[in-house]
Amino acid sequence: MSDPILTLYQGLERLGPGAPEDVAWAAHVADVPPDARICDAGCGTGADIPALMTVAPVGAITAVDDAKLFVDEVLARFGTRVNAYAGDMAKLKGPYDFIWSAGAVYFHGVTKVLRAWRPVLAKGGAVAFSEPCLFTDTPSEATLAFWGGYERLTDAEGIARQVADADYEVLATRRVSDAAWAAYYGPLAERVAALRRNADPVLALALDAAETEIAAWEHVRAETGYLLSVVRPV
Ligand SMILES: C[S@@+](CC[C@H](N)C(=O)[O-])C[C@H]1O[C@@H](n2cnc3c(N)ncnc32)[C@H](O)[C@@H]1O
């Protein structure tokens, strides 16, 4: 991520759509035990860590993000309760009973990441990830533009094919709720407004882009969003 993006997102508790209910649902599907070894891959500032701690109250949480600034925020928020480090999510060490990844797998692609995670999953372990998804066969130009030309953008069947290509099976899927998007965009809009007053031209461009995205969401949300998939190696 470039500096203006880091400036924009620094201090936000959520860097993408999500809700504690999503974590609870995925952990239930994956049968995550209370003492699970969990990795939050692409953890950002730790939005989902409290919910992960709830599903595994005597578990061990590792949080990985390639942005050190965000990892520092996780360490400040959760201290020694979380083993947080800066690194590439495709190079995890493990073993893990459950890998959670909200809005981050797309940086590498579903198939590549799932293949990389297979050796670090404990026996019976599972992965839950959210991924951009089309919910219509006839997406509008605005919907395609919303994802900025994401080359692997597809529908639920297409995501399932990417999962199968990595030799995983889909246990269940569900659409990330509008409330989860509001939990992301509400605080982001407030942050944009707060930064606007003293923004230099480079930061102003990033703020413009964020405002455009938030406004566009209202027009495209019937056609697209995130699909949350819970998957396991076959
Ligand atoms: C959209 S944010 C989501 C963050 C968090 N999961 C949340 O929901 O708030 C995506 C995160 O993935 C991180 N990221 C991108 N590529 C990564 C990689 N290769 N390894 C680890 N983290 C990565 C980014 O720094 C960013 O924090």
Image (cartoon, helix red, strand yellow):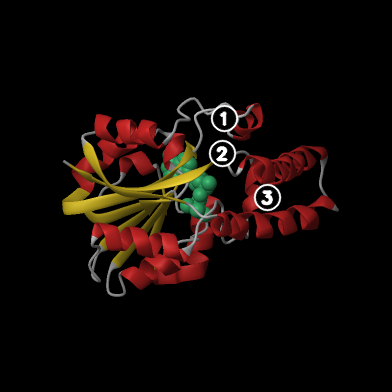
Say whether mark 3 is within 8 Å of ligand 1. Answer: no
Q: Nearer the viewer, residue 137 or 187?
A: 137
Marked residue nearer the N-terminal end (3 or 2): 3
In the picture, the quarter occupied by the C terminus is top left
Residue behind mark 3: 8
Whether residue 94 is visible here, answered yes or no, is no
Residue 223 image label: 2
Q: Quick one: label 3 or label 1, which is nearer the N terminus?
A: 3
Q: Quadrant of the N terminus?
A: top right
Q: Disc 3 vs disc 1: which is toward the camera? A: 1
Q: How many marks?
A: 3
Separation of marks 1 and 2 at Cα, in angstroms: 6 Å
Rendering coords of residue 27 (x, y %): 31, 61
Query: In this rendering, is residue 196 above or below 216?
Result: below
Q: Is disc 1 surrounded by few (<14), some (14 to 19) or many (20+) residues within 10 Å? A: some
Of 65 and 183, nearer the camera is: 183
